[in-house]
Image (spheres, rainbow, N blue to C red):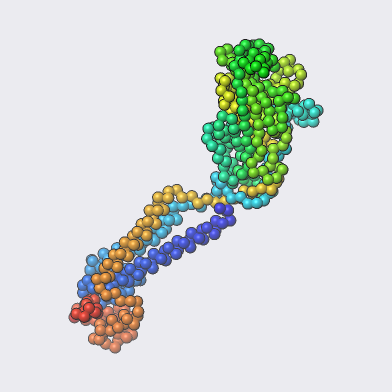
Amino acid sequence: MPAHKKKEFNTLIVGLTILLSLNLASSLKHMVATLRWWVLSLKEWRPREVDLILQSENISRMIRLLYVSKRYSLRFYVIVWVLINVAAQIGLACIGLTYNVNGADKIVPTVNGIVSIPDLTSIQTNRLLGQHQQTPSRLQALNALRFTANNYGTPGLASGLTYGVPFKPPTPGTLYNPDTSALTCINASACYMTFYESTPENLSYYAIAASNRSASTASKCQAFKVTQGGNGDFDNITVADASLPSFRLPIKNGPDQTTFIVDPEKDQHVGWSVVSAFEASNTNPWFYRCNVSVGPVVNAVIPAHELGNDIKLMAPAAIALQGYGASTLTNVTNRIQFQSYPAESVYGSPASGDTATMGFITSLFAISVIWTTSQANTNINATGRLPVPGITLDINKWEYVHLILGLIMGLQLLFALISITLSNLVMVRDHSHFGEAALLRSTMYDLSYRAVMANEKELASLFPKTATIRYIREENDTYYLRVTT
């Protein structure tokens, strides 16, 4: 919940605790008021004891019985009841120890507002290029895009990959956590990522949280067995494809590597590209043709949410893009783009003719380019869901909460049943002062006129020293206080 709601939440919790405390105190007070008549019926009591027992609804009056009365049974009754009241309040206080209200560190509320989002109109090349190269010619600018796109494919792996599970985007408002995988590939050929929004620079706090937008890439491949020249030491290879029996390689890199190749004029398009791959091996060489595509941004509502054409053009073919080239001797036409990856790397690992594996590799590279671009590009301000500071209610163990509330409610019910059972053994008087006065009238006949103005201690002293009082039943089933001297 928003941080400004913390005071309201604390007020609510305090209010509920007070209400529960008042309810519990009222319940215990009613129980002891009911039990006092049963206590008075147990035996003969001295007048001072009777007076305090009748006032036992007041806990301070009940405690006086500990030093006024010499009867251990009455002292035990007082101690038990005081402990019950103390335990009830301790139980209520313990509720506050079971939870903490902390600042949100995993997910925060979001509100409509201005947010900072990555500029997705193009791949910004200034992160990788020297200052003297940032005003290039048209060809240099194109090569810069290719070079940057290819270099962005590998860093995406460092952001983490989840493979083989359904894509579950983080809940909007989830704070960015570098330990959480940024990329998800649900199967061998489809990969996903989520876009994040951050607070603009003019705010006093900074937060970057997940949006409800995501991007995806997909790849579908065909595999052909290489029948000649498969060890990577020849200019041409022969493949088992009737439509393309021979293929000229742009470079001879030897075995145990995979070379990805793309013809920008024929194979590279906005949103999709056809990428060829030669898996060189001394024993099991293969050739692949993959159609790699980038899907539209899910939940995009404004143009700034969409991927720019440069990104959609470069990302599908980025695994093969070379830009400035690793070898000018083998790529003098500036047309064929290629990149080689050793078999020990993720992108160069042999698929051994498995089209699903090659589809995964090419799709993963494309989504990695988009993810790294979203992290490396500068931000722009746009309308969105602004993350705001929030608080979370942390309860370490719900078992403790259930135990405390269960004990409070359960013991309250138990004591209520006990008090009802015991009080049914005698006639329970109501709380009417006139009713109590009528009951006590018979005990005052032998007292002098001074009883009218005496306090409770003086009034008890007016009784004979041997006087005792007990609450008993007459033959007609009515109860009264009998005074014995």
- Residue in the image at 65% along x and 31% along y: 293
Residue 324 as seen in the image, left or right of residue 40: right
Q: In which image quadrant can residue 268 be found?
A: top right
Residue 456 image offset from top left, x and y in percent? 31, 79
Closer to the camera in the image, 394 or 58: 394
Closer to the camera in the image, 263 or 342: 263
- Identity of the residue furthest to the front in this view: 242
- Residue in the image at 68% along x and 16% along y: 247
**Res. 380 visible in picture:** no
- Identity of the residue furthest to the right in this view: 137
Q: Is residue 456 above or below residue 190?
A: below
Residue 476 image offset from top left, x and y in percent? 21, 80
Residue 428 image offset from top left, x and y in percent? 29, 74
Closer to the camera in the image, 99 or 258: 258
- Residue in the image at 23% along x and 73% along y: 41
- Residue in the image at 23% along x and 86% along y: 446
Residue 459 image offset from top left, x and y in percent? 29, 81
Residue 427 as seen in the image, left or right of residue 344: left
Quarter placement of the C terminus:
bottom left
